[in-house]
Amino acid sequence: MRWHQILHLLCFNFFLHFSLRFVSSHCPPDQRDVLLHFKNSFVLDREASDHCDWNDHVISYPKTNSWNKSIDCCSWDGVACDGVSGNVISLDLACSWLHGPLWSNSSLFLLCHLQSLNLFGNNFIGSHISPNLSAFAKLTHLNLSSSQFVGIVPSEISRFSELVSLDLSVNNILDTHSSSSLMLENSIFTMIVHNLTVLRKLVLDEVDMSMVSPKSFANLSSSLTYLSVVSCSLGGTFPSTVFQLLSLTTLDISDNFNLFGILPKSNWTSPLESLSLGFTSFSGEIPNSIGNMKNLTFLDLSYSRFTGHIPSSMWNLYQLQVLRIANNSFSEVVEFENFTKLKNLRQLLVTQELNLIYDALEYTFPKLEQLGLYSCNLTKFPYFLTSLKRLRYLGLSSNRISGEIPMWFWGISHDTMEMLNLSNNLLEGGIQHLHKTNLQKIYIWNNSFRGPLPILPPSTIDFDASENGFTGEIPFLICQLSSLRILYLYDNNLFGNMPSCFGNLTNLLLLDLSNNKLQGPLPRSLVRCVNLSTIVLSHNEFTDIFPHWLEVPYLQDLDLQFNKFHGKINFTAFGLSFPTLLTLSISNNNFTGRWPTEIFSNTSLYVLDLSNNKFGGPIPFPSPVTFYYSIASNKMTGKIPSFICNFTELKIIDLSNNTLTGSLPQCLTNFGANLSVLNLRMNYLEGIIPQSFSLRSGLMTLDLSQNQFEGMLPRSLVKCRHLEILDLNDNQIEDTFPGWLGTLPELKILVLRSNNLKGLLNIPTGGHIFPKLHILDLSNNNFSGPLPTNLIMSLKAMMNGKNGQDKSLYMTRDIWGENSRWRSYENSVTVTMKGQEFWLVKIFTFLTLIDLSNNSFEWNISEFIGQLHSLVGLNLSHNHLTGSIPLTLGNLTNLEWLDLSSNKLSGVIPRKLGDLASLGCLNLSKNQLTGRIPQDKQLSTFSSNSFNGNLGLCGTPLPKACPGDAQTPLSSSPSTFDQEEHESWLKQKTTWIGYASGIIIGISIAYISFETGRPKWLVRGVRMLERRAAKWMKKPKGKATKFHGR
């Protein structure tokens, strides 16, 4: 047989053998049936794969639809088999619309030959990852991401010794009641690191790794090329050895705020292409060695804590396409020209003062698509922007760019620009050419734009023009923006009715028109805006009934506060119209009627604010998930049911200013760690305050004032270690001074006015008590003995004026609930100023005062009171004090009012009181003072009312002349200030208004005028004063995440 015949025979045998093997590769029937059983255990739901719509590389469709017995399962969509045995070795059901639980006894786990399993982008509705995964002993690729798995990652994951790729990312469930996610324990992660020695890709984004020690990362496999642990709640110090893994190309540990670390000075892994450390606590200088990473295309160091200078070697990273270095603490002004060396940049994000020539054109970025120069101290629009031809996103917010927008600006990347952010600048004038662009997202909030709202381009999706000075009506042209999803126009001067065509905006999701002068009824066409999730119309002049007619199925936030809505609410229609409502804020309107007590029991309301209306009847219960609950200032009647304590998510309970009766349920004082504010002020509650406050109490504000409580103060209050405000004024409490409250480390305000407290204020010498107290009101009680020197010497916050380092303007409490909902709560207090009681609906953090008036204190005024340098108000009137006015009172340079009247003080008036430039009110009347009234500086501004009733005083402004005077001084009217004098006091005393503390009287009283509309002179003055206060506080301009319900 010739050699070529032998060769043909061998080829034939090989072909026959291969054909037989190919024939035998059909899917085994048992595995086919397993797959069909698996298919039938789920329903197909397009929304189960919603997450896939955000992924450009994956198409969502139901792969299992094509599975049937008539076709070999090896050819089914998503199924791959071994070419020899026919066993199913790969199952790829990514984005396949699967909806339902994946049980531990699922037929899936019978496919024991699987080497690759991809279930990405389905909805397994909170299933746990089954330990039965161990059946896949030869698994090399496992992807369970974005499929709503929860619970603890099982240890069986760590036994796949051949695993090359593992992705468990983005498995969390957020609903209206709770949130849950995958959790990875330290011991299991340690085993994964130790056992999976051939692992090349590890993705654990949004897996809860709060229990994992970052030290474990030091033992990762040297074969690892891709590591991503974004937003995993990691805490501690990240090992720098990870940056030196020989094969690593991608490292993303961003969004782990408590993760610390520094960058290595040498021995970086040379293959590294992508490094993301954004939103971590990495610190120190960026080492010069970063310039050796020649393969880097993506570098994100933003929102971290890097310091020092940016190394010059960074400008040698010529492959960089994305550079984010925003929000660090670099110490130098950066030469903007350096960025132009990176010719491949597509995205640049910087927040650093820049040295750039505004009119220059030589800054070239041929590939730049996204540019963010935030907080760079820019004062003009840089002209080089005109050379950018591919720009899609431009952000210049939080600079100091002023004046009008130049005409040339609208030509920047005219055909490609999609997003423009000019917010938080000093821009002014009108906007004329916006409609000629192709912009989709436009953010111009917090500027000084004036005139009518600009005409928007038809492509607009998001428009935020809030916090400007736009005037006029909302134009009807806005109704033509069919793609509009977000419309924020709050804090402008818009007036008139909402356009009747508003219903044309059928894609609208978020609407905020608050803080304008809009009026009239709501347009009924809004009923067509079925996608609305937020409606904020507060602080306007709308006049309408409650919009139960709206019937918006996805509405989550409804805010109608501070308008003129009126009438009864159709409670039946309420529940049907807003089935998904999470916040309901309808305070400060004229609604009437009685709420059914159980109406909110089946809702998911996190915030329920019904305050300042005319609702009557018993109090309605909140939702089981409510954290903010206010029915204050209504006409609610009946008792407070103990059943309210079953709503354990409550953080704010405000039932104040109603006509509630009965006793205080004991469970409210032992509510637990959640409750922060309990306000029952101005009711008819009686009995003894329960003694059941516990160490686990989270109370920060307790206001039981203006009720009829009696008995002794509960000693268990000392367990409330977080308490900041305690107001029990106007009750019938009989006790001695509660010096034991001085051990509360956070107590800032203590008001015990108008009770039956008595005895001496005995405070041990050298006691470290009341360390943060800055308002103390013990007036109108029966205290006696000398003024408490030891107490005065212990008030450290009144000495240094720091008040616990609080940098905010008001004592406002921000309360967070579930689902990222939050609500601010304004603490309030009643104080005596100028002899009158005022309710301060907002409390300045730097308001510092002592009121010991209307008691029986005697002896001298302690000179140590002059050490309380931050005092703004001091009232010691109506006691039995003797001796002279201490000279040290002249040290109280922040003092605005001083009342020592109706005592037995003697001697002369100290001239040093004239140095108190902030002093706006002085009352020394009805004492035994003698001598000439000093006319030095501030003392010369007061009328005779400040000095009457002192027979030994003489000189201006009293009618009694002093011996040796050439003529009798002009007499002053004995009457109190009239309106004109008040206006003069407000407008002309620029000396004391210029001081920080000098603003307090004006604003604090003026907020009362907003509630009552009286007196008119204060209404006119309040805005001016608040602007001065904000300027003094130097509050930085910025936009915080805003809850729709201010």
Image (cartoon, rainbow, N blue to C red):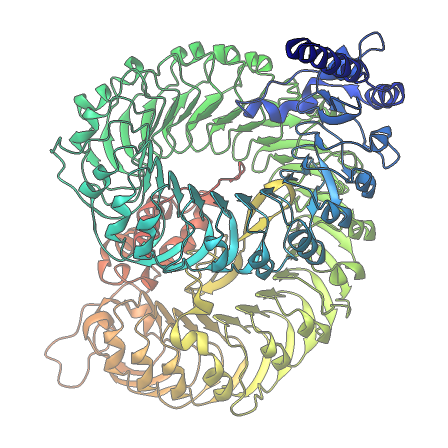
Give the side of residue 267 with respect to residue 357, left or right: right
Q: How many numbered dots are placed on residues in this image? A: 0
Give the position of the N terminus as an image quadrant. top right
Of residues 814 and 877, the one drawn nearer to the viewer in this rendering: 814
Of residues 1006 and 80, the one drawn nearer to the viewer in this rendering: 80
Give the side of residue 167 with respect to residue 970, left or right: right
Give the side of residue 939 with respect to residue 182, left or right: left
Of residues 848 and 639, the one drawn nearer to the viewer in this rendering: 848
Q: Residue at x 80, y 25 (%)?
A: 87
Percent from the top left, x then y, of residue 442? 37, 25
Of residues 348 and 507, the one drawn nearer to the viewer in this rendering: 348
Percent from the top left, x then y, of residue 444? 33, 30
Percent from the top left, x then y, of residue 651? 66, 52
Image quadrant where residue 144 sits: top right
Q: Residue at x 17, y 25 (%)?
A: 406
In this rendering, is residue 34 above or below 821? Answer: above
In this rendering, is residue 612 above or below 98? Answer: below
In this rendering, is residue 185 above or below 532? Answer: below
Q: Is residue 500 visible?
A: no
Specify the farthest residue to the front: 1
Percent from the top left, x then y, of residue 551? 66, 18
Image quadrant where residue 834 sits: bottom left
Q: Residue at x 73, y 21 (%)?
A: 83
Q: Is residue 516 visible?
A: yes
Give the side of residue 446 with respect to residue 750, left or right: left
